[in-house]
Amino acid sequence: MVNFRLVPTTLEVMIGKGSVDQLGDIPFIDIEYNINRLLNRGMKRTVDIALSLFLLICVLPFVYFLRILGKRKGSPLASALALMPRVLNGELSLIGRDPSRLSSGTAGIFLGKPGVTGMVQIQAGPRLTDEECNYYELYYAKNQSFALDFEIMMKTLMRWLQKSVNTPRRGNAQSRS
């Protein structure tokens, strides 16, 4: 019996689901994440297409109407809706890596497409260290599932709603002065 012990150079080895194959005397280590599974990728892409189409067809006209009336300007929802064509094209996913961190320490590892929102973004994004961001990105890649995506989406919606409630409307800030 042969035992293998690895000294990880990144979190990839610590978090990933690994297996060891052997070709003659040479061991090959394979690390697999949920994000790389064909079924997970197919379900994720299907949800991306369905939700982005729904948002573009049903929600975008309402947000556009509110912008015309001058009620809301620059809301997080409007910014996210502007990215929906890129989600439909497959450039982005609804939930994925932080697009601003694509050149980080985990750049050589496929952790899925960049997303409109994700683990790093809901954990206070810019205030996180690189090590914390790498941890959240790798955690997501390992544990990606419909349930985790749903949880991230709900937390993102709650954050957006909180921001829109706490942000004064145009014109109201002047009338209070």
Image (cartoon, grey):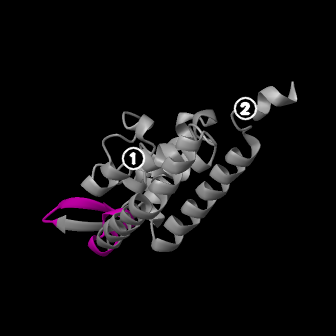
Classify the position of the N terminus by image quarter. bottom left
Which element is circle 2 on? loop
| Contact, mark 1 vs mark 2 (Cβ under 8 Å) | no
Quarter of the image holding residue 174?
A: top right
Q: Residues within 10 Å of mark 1 (few under 14, many from 20)?
A: some
Give coordinates of residue 107: x percent, y percent. Answer: 34, 40
Give coordinates of residue 172: x percent, y percent. Answer: 77, 34
Quarter of the image holding residue 40?
A: bottom left
Give coordinates of residue 92: x percent, y percent. Answer: 34, 50
Q: Nearer the viewer, residue 80 or 174?
A: 174
Task: Tell me the amino acid under the disc marked 2.
Answer: Gly
- Can you name the residue that lies furthest to the left here? 24
Give coordinates of residue 52: x percent, y percent. Answer: 39, 61
Q: Residue at x 67, y 53 (%)?
A: 161
Q: Nearer the viewer, residue 13 or 77?
A: 77
Looking at the image, residue 17 sits to the left or right of residue 169; the answer is left
Magenta segment:
23-40
* Label at residue 83: 1
Looking at the image, residue 150 sits to the left or right of residue 50; the answer is right
Q: Nearer the viewer, residue 75 or 86?
A: 75
Which element is circle 1 on? loop
Would you place residue 143 above or below residue 131 in this image? Answer: below
Instruction: Kindly identify which residue carries mark 2.
Output: 171
Q: Earlier in the sequence, mark 1 or mark 2?
A: 1
Looking at the image, residue 81 sits to the left or right of residue 160; the answer is left
